[in-house]
Amino acid sequence: QAQVRSFFNMTTYCAVDGKVRNYKPRANNRFLTIRSYDVSGRKKDTAVQIKPDGSYFLWYIVPIANNIDIGYSGTFVKIVARSDGRNQFDIDDKLWVSAEHKSKAIIPLDEMSRHTVAKLDYDYHFKKRKFNTQVDWTDSSYSDDALVELRLQRMKEELAYTDSFFRARPVSYYIERLMQTNIRFEAADDIVYSLFTFSRKRTYSHDKLFALVKHFPVDSMLSALSTPFYKFAYHLAGALQISYLNDPAFEDLRRQSPLYQFPYILDKIDSTDHTRSTGIWYKLLYYNLYIANSPARTAFYEARFYSKVNDQLLRNNMDAWRATYNKPFTEYSLLDKLKAADADAVMKQRLISLFESHKEKYVYMDFWGNWCEPCMQEMPHYPEFIGRLKNKNIIFLF
């Protein structure tokens, strides 16, 4: 059992439950969206149609608690969620639309939603705060080392402000520590991402990157509840590869084979101390390094992944990635999926009728809204596109 257990939530579904008060349907407020994040910090949106009375209920699954945002009427905010049941809160539509401060629009119905209101209050004031240290990653007059120091100084200012904010507005110790952890890993992610983008020379070495990690609590259990922690691991894995490809010291190895980067980077990961706490950080580096490359490039080193990474979710994801890469599409019955979908009955029947009446054709269906600027920009190009396919067995629906 120790070989197959996972640090992450793999099977427990969570729920968001509540009602939009003063609800009147508009073009952009018919859905509530949950934005969850995977173990590489990438987002996934799941939406549910809000009922005419304003009520909503949405199931979702997320590897770690807290890693969700809610989206309503064109705006997303980060909330504090639980991973073992329902998250219950109402939304006041009038205040959501009119108030810049979204915590005023959330009506908490349980303990976690009360934490959410406190967090949104903090987020609002944090964004309004003017910090002394500013970092411009596009400024070539600064060295990489100088900009890293500036970003770490900015992080210290943000942590000091957070400490003073919560002294004046007492909340649970857990929320305060979570906000501090988010600040640390937002800084970490900003550094490793920015060093290898913008107009930087991308010369930051592996040794410097691993030394940078020591500034951050990568082996803390609380860190593993923070979304920026996963983005940092994902971008660091990419930075390690870019650093290898740009470092003149590896020119001879690159000439021999582009695959030499994998054992070198994996050896560097293995040589660092990862004996504390969860150990999930180093497994994430392994995982992100592998999924950033095709199975054809990493096949020779796959056994090493499975020998080092014993977390079942990461292993399952790796298996799924390899299978998807080798067979990217599996046929399915669209009508069967529509009939089984938990969606508005009238909309379902309209779609089913459309597809049943065009069974022998390919169907191109465009969902659009008149509030959607990219949709409107796209429309003038459709006549030419449709004209090019006029002799094909295809129908266009808008």
Image: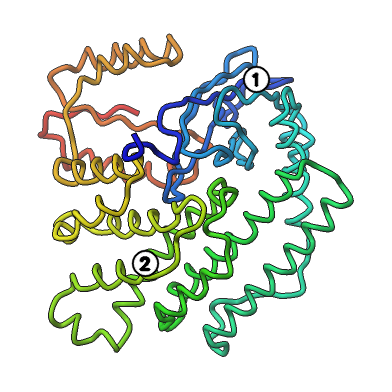
Amino acid at the residue labelled 1: Gly
Q: Where is residue 119 in the image (x, y as percent from the top left)?
A: 73, 43
- Total marks placed: 2
Query: Crowding near pointer 1: few (<14 within 10 Å), some, many (20+)?
Result: many
Q: Residue at x 23, y 57 (%)?
A: 304
**Which colour style is shown?**
rainbow
- The answer to whether 394 is drawn above or below residue 135 in the figure is above
Q: Where is residue 24 in the image (x, y as percent from the top left)?
A: 67, 20
Left or right: residue 256 compared with residue 275? left
- The answer to whether 288 is drawn above or below residue 310 in the figure is below
Residue 18: numbered disc: 1
Amino acid at the residue labelled 2: Ile
Nearest the eye: 193 or 337? 193
Mark 1 or 2: the one toward you? 2
Left or right: residue 73 compared with residue 196? right
Left or right: residue 147 compared with residue 44? right
